[in-house]
Image (cartoon, grey):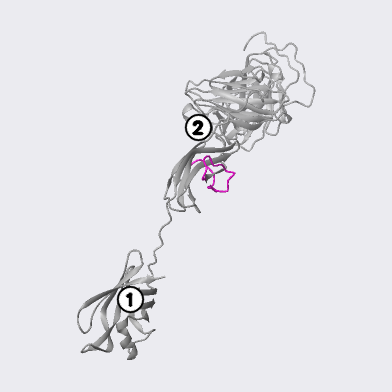
Amino acid sequence: MKKNLLVSFIGILILFLSSCSNDGAPDEDPTEIIPPNENNLTEILVIPNATLVKSENIPLSSAILEAPLITNIDTNISYSSGSKIVLAADFYSPLKANLKGAYVQVKGSNSYYDVSIDSDINNGLISLPIGLPAVVEVDNLVLILKFYDKSGKISAITEVNVTITKPENCGKTKVSGGHGITSTIFTLPETAGQVKISYETYTVKDKIDIFQNGIWIGGTGSNTERATLRRALNCSAATEALGYVGEKGEFLFTYDPSLGKEIEVVVSGCEMGGTKWEYEFSCPGDFTPEVKLPIITTTAADLVTHNSATTGGIIDVNEGSVITERGVVWDVNTNPTTNLSTKSIEGNGNDTFSSSLSNLLPNTTYYVRAFAVNSDGTFYGNEISFTTSSPPVVINLSLDGKWLNSAGVGIIIAGNNGTLYSFSPNWEIAKNKGYVDVGSVKMKEIVKVNDRKWNCKDLYLTTTNGQIDGVTWSFDGTITMSADGKSITATSTGPVSGNVGSLVYNRVD
């Protein structure tokens, strides 16, 4: 403890329990201590639910096997004058007795406080907030702490070394430190806006949290209760999942002066790892936030047809704002934008996605760009192009319809039968004799074998001595269609002559 201590203060902050506010102003008028010295520094801690005992001797600790244990408490901390010290620790009573109170003294003082806590905790996390005077011109002090349970057992002494600094103003003030908890108060102007913290935590990880009126408003990790904030147990436990970072970086938080003009920055330096850190604190509105643009890649077109194609994109958020919409946009002109109706929306997020383009024109070149939307605007990827193919030739592979051969024999095939609708001259005799007529079946029992082949029975005219005298059927007839679907070849074996004959029929549109 430094000699010739000078403590001047406007108001005395009080020791808060869990229901107290962060500014810690007492209801009664502050008592001025003149001159401040080692014997009366304890008395500047005006503590609700506490009794000032005029003795330098705190009650003796209980036997080791019965005494409550206080572990995992920060014994080297740094706070700005005018702020609230928050001491978090693990409390354990071997007798399973709940925490009842604490003894608090500034080392070297001739008095101490008996603080009534009356907790229901006998094995768990406890928190003891202590208010510092608004202005303290002293570099450091040592707090003597003992806790006792409802069985009357008293813990061993815990000494906490407190380094006291003056409150800072904003404006890229550099603050540095190492192990333990370091709390610094920044007094900000009436202007609202975003504030940037630029930090360097080097190799060993440290955690930064920002509080306004005791409420967490930003940091390197997630929301943290101020009353439970403490260092990592050791540097190996200081993980990124808990908000500890071992690198250079920056983050922003929003300052609203209506919630209070004092901002508390708490750095939790891990122990047993040679940690050190530093940061700079800007004023609200002193900088233009850097916009981190997403990186967007438009993927090459695939499965291109005469009227469709598949493409997509790869989105890398690049530490920027969250992607709320993504997709692709296309047009017959270069540099298409989302103002066009020819676009697809493919959800959100920063990963790979695909998109199907439809209703395209054949033999047309299209230009495509992937896009992503976030709070900073709409951003586009590289432009790709592709050309749709010609429309496919429609081939009618249906056997149904009209067919006519070069001899003038015409048939109409429908389903399993093909009927005559015209004759060649040599069939006229058969017609005159009543063997066949228009509408008579020429092919029957037509059965499909594959896309271009059918089996059937084919009608033949019979003759005697060269004279047509009847009709009969070939039982091995086949019908084969050409690749373009425009002609068929009917092949069969004459049932009387045994000769194989073929006739080509052309489709009649």
Q: Residue at x 74, y 21 (%)?
A: 12
> Can residue 277 be seen from the camera position used here?
yes
Q: Is 344 rendered above or below residue 468?
A: above
> Residue 15: x, y in percent?
69, 26
Q: Position of residue 28 (x, y in %)?
A: 79, 25
- Extreme residue in the top direction: 4
Q: Which mark is residue 404?
A: none
Distance between mark 2 and mark 1 Cα atoms:
74 Å
Asked if residue 156 can be seen in this view, the reply is no
Q: Is residue 120 left or right of residue 235?
A: right
Say few, some or many: other residues with alpha carbon within 10 Å of mark 2 (under 14 / 14 to 19 / 20 or more).
some
Q: Nearer the viewer, residue 245 or 342?
A: 342
Residue 41 in the image, given as x and y percentages of width and height: 69, 16
Q: Is residue 42 magenta?
A: no
Number of residue marks: 2
**Residue 305 falls left or right of residue 228:** left
Judging from the image, what secondary structure is the residue with disc 1 in? strand
**Residue 174 or residue 434, whichever sits in front:** 434
Q: Are marks 2 and 1 in contact (CB under 8 Å)?
A: no
The N terminus, quarter of image: top right
Which amino acid, mark 2? Glu
Provide the residue span drawn in magenta.
331-352
Q: Quarter of the image for the C terminus: give it.
A: bottom left
Determine which residue is flagged by label 2: 240
Circle 1 residue: 447
Q: Amino acid at mark 1?
A: Val
Is residue 428 toward the left or the right of residue 466 in the image? right
